[in-house]
Amino acid sequence: MASFSLKSFFHLAITIWLFSDPALAKRAGMTRHYKFDIKMKNVTRLCQTKNIVTVNGQFPGPTITAREGDRVIVKVVNHVQYNISIHWHGVRQLRSGWADGPAYITQCPIQTGQSYVYNFTITGQRGTLFWHAHISWLRVTLYGPIVILPKRGVPYPFPQPFKEVPIIFGEWWKADTETIINKAMQTGGAPNISDAYTFNGLPGPLYNCSSKDTFKLKVKPGKTYLLRLVNAALNDELFFSIANHNLTVVEADAVYVKPFKTNIVLITPGQTTNVLLRTKHHHPNATFLIAARPYATGPAAFDNSTTAGILEYHTPSNTTKNIKKLPLLKPKLPIFNDTTFTTSFIKKIRSLNSAKFPAKVPQKVDKHFFFTVGLGLNACPKNQTCQGPNNTMLAASVNNVSFVMPSTALLQAHFSNQSKGVYTTDFPANPPSNFNYTGTPPNNIMVTSGTKVVLLPFNTSVELIMQDTSIIGAESHPLHLHGFNFFVVGQGFGNYNSKTDPAKFNLVDPAERNTVGVPSGGWVAIRFLADNPGVWFMHCHLEVHTSWGLKMAWIVMDGKRRHQKLPPPPSDLPKC
């Protein structure tokens, strides 16, 4: 009893000491606990009811809120028939790779009736990110926002908003998406396109039988609102706009940017953007449509529909205006393939690069990589008819390697030095052969397959050029890197020229992101410092391309010091 009280006393004394020193309290952060029960729920959209996978019966799922420096602990319990894993998209996961979440990369999935505790600290990040399922196509309904507030007492580097509102873009299919992708993978054809896009799970009034399922943003005149925009759609980049209102972009992928005004925002799947909306000073006698529709550059069919919500000004209680009679103004969005707008918008995103928030762009490069990203074909299995071009199967690849998911997690194999039969470390640093990447495709467009990775010594400074190809069709590919932010130092159209293009790189204040669009028929150059030991997935965030193999992994080795090594796995790490 005495030892217990003594222990309690010391605990209390340390707590008082910690929190009586504001500087320490600010640094220490707190622990935030969440429980995610994965369960099925009947949801009706577009006049059809379907049974979907949810967290805690919510769709979209719950918001994770934390401050920079906080520790987040999420217990995920799987009550559904599918294997589950959850990815905390954009969270750096410094030395906590076991909590990153992509199935068969950093963990085996959580099987039915099993649970896993994700445990990570949010270090040096503030802004909007999101979490989503990272296995098959289950992220179609398993997603929700991550709101990282600055440390207590630290202001935003922009005007303090009156209110903050997350708006998550999603994609909705009437049919069961697991059936759709499984059938497409068997036949080699393209999967069926979605039936609607959504704001916070609601398709809005422009779809049949959907007007009651409309997102409404109620605002007061003369106020500033922070809209936390997330593109959680499966396969489509989206333009976003609010009729007759300007937006000020202040952050992208949880990194502050130099603020700029725009009336249209482009967000690829996997990206987040924070915008300030300043409402009109007087009640405008109108309501305003909030809308999003796709930016699509590839050869394939796509869902060319528009999701809409309504921006509604609060009517003072002493007036009797009938909102239904007010005119509804609509925004003008670019046409679906407006690459000119897209390019000029992307160029405006630059790191804030202030004294408080510097852009630490690697100035020297230790290792150069050149990756082609795009589509290709696989041969049809014997005695089967396939739905790809000329009886083939559609595929996708990086440097012509279509990645094959292992049956055990790469991180476990790496940590226990048991890579044999799981993966090989011969991922090519360059394409197997040079060709006119954005011109006439080569005669042979068959891909090779394998579970290949790149090994990087700790603290390697990496420059990676990602080049789109015109094989089957040039297309914009949003590439997402787990475990790191990277700097987008350059981009252009046509084939990358290693002699002339580097002279144009921005090494001062480039955008710092976790997901970047490789331009359709063009290239993008990124730099990052491999300072996070573990196995880190890199893939296209168009889910159909990931399914086809447009993915690979980097293994970052341990450093020499203790805090440069990956700790051992938690005891409840799921087994395959």
Image (tube, rainbow, N blue to C red):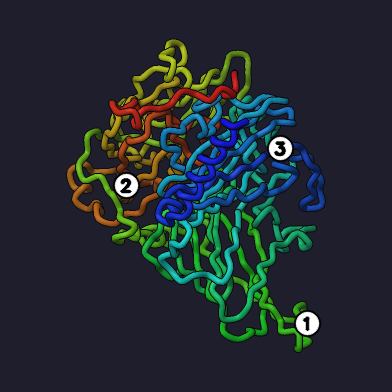
Q: Quadrant of the N terminus?
A: top right
Q: Is residue 517 visible?
A: no
Amino acid on which the number 1 mark rests in the picture: Asn
- Please tell me how crowded label 1 is: few (under 14), some (14-19), or many (20+) other residues with Cα within 10 Å: few
The CA distance from mark 2 to mark 1 is: 54 Å
Residue at horizontal 35%, vertical 54%?
511
Q: State the residue position of label 1.
A: 322
The CA distance from mark 1 to mark 3 is: 42 Å
Q: Are marks 1 and 3 in contact (CB under 8 Å)?
A: no
Mark 2 falls on what kind of element? loop
Q: State the residue position of label 3.
A: 37
> Which of the two marks, 2 or 1, is nearer to us in this view?
1
Q: Does residue 397 appear left or right of residue 165 in this picture? A: left
Mark 3 falls on what kind of element? strand
498 w.r.t. 417: above or below: below
Residue at horizontal 45%, vertical 38%?
93
First of labels 1, 3 by sequence position? 3
Q: Are marks 3 and 2 in contact (CB under 8 Å)?
A: no
Amino acid on which the number 3 mark rests in the picture: Asp
> Which of the two marks, 3 or 2, is nearer to us in this view?
3
Residue at horizontal 48%, vertical 58%?
152
Closer to the camera, 173 or 419?
419
Disc ID at residue 494: 2
Q: Does residue 518 appear left or right of residue 166 in this picture? A: left
The spot of residue 354 in percent (x, y) is 30, 61
Closer to the camera, 560 or 379?
560
Amino acid on which the number 2 mark rests in the picture: Gly
Q: Quadrant of the C terminus?
A: top right
First of labels 2, 1 by sequence position? 1
